[in-house]
Amino acid sequence: LSSSEGYSPTQAMIQSNLGRTVNQKYNTQSKIAAGMGEKMLKLHELYMETYLNKDYTLDNHRLMWLRAMNQNYDTINMDMSVRLWPPHIQKQIGKFLLEMILYDLKVDANIFRSRAQERIVPAFCSIVRPDVSFFTATEIKMHPVVTKLFNVDNTESFTFDPSTVPMIIPPVPG
C-alpha cells in the first residue's frame, strides 16, 4: 500500500492475499496443535546425527531422511496434508478482514500538530481508477498521516512467498 499516486494493489488482490494468509496461518496452527513441530525437530536431530557420524558413509540425502523417519516410529505419520480452502472462501475471508481495516481503523489527522484539535479520520480509503481494459480497479490508499507515521515512502521492501520464488536447490524434505 502506498499514499502516492503510483501503483497500489487492487482491492481484489488484497482480499485474496489476506484470505490466503489466514489459510496458511490456519494450517500452521493445525500442525503445531498436532505436535508436528516437536516431531519434525526430533526427525531433524536423527537426520543430523546420521549426517555428522564419521563412521557412516554418506549416500542419497532423501534415503537418509527416510531412514531417520523409519528409525523413529513417532514421526512416520507426519504426512499431514495442507487444507487449502477454495479461492472464493479465501477471498470472502479477505473481504471481511479488509472491510474491518477500511471501516474500523481510524487515525488522528492532526497528530503532528501540537495545538490542533483531534480529528479522527479513516486510516485507509479505497479509490476507483479506470483500467486500460475498460474496467475499473479499486485500489486501497493510506491516509498521508499513516504514511508519515510509518515512514512508508522512504522504505523499499519486496516480500515474496517462498513457494513462488525459483530455487537453485530443491526444498528440504518435510
Image (spheres, helix red, strand yellow):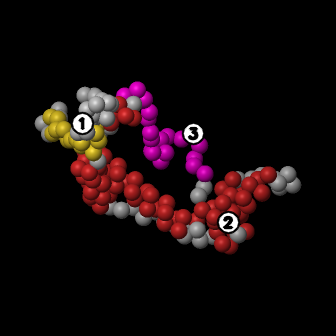
| Residue 75 within the segment the image draws in magenta | no
Q: Which residues are magenta?
A: 152-172
Q: CA distance from mark 3 to mark 2?
A: 26 Å
In which quadrant of the rendered image does the N terminus lie? top left
| Residue 166 within the segment the image draws in magenta | yes
Query: Given the current orientation, which residue lies at the most extreme bottom position?
Result: 73
Residue at 49% from the left image edge and 63% from the top image edge: 29
Residue at 25% from the left image edge and 28% from the top image edge: 5
Q: Secondary structure at mark 2?
A: helix
Disc sitting over residue 117 in the figure: 1
* Disc 3 crowd, CA 10 A, few/some/many (<14, 14-19, 20+): few
In the image, residue 44 lies at what x, y percent? 68, 58
| Quadrant assignment, res 152 | top left
Q: Earlier in the sequence, mark 3 or mark 1?
A: 1
Question: According to the image, label 3 marks what residue?
Answer: 168
In the image, residue 102 lies at what x, y percent? 25, 47
Q: Can residue 54 be seen in the rendering of this structure? A: yes
Mark 3 residue type: Ile
* Disc 1 crowd, CA 10 A, few/some/many (<14, 14-19, 20+): few
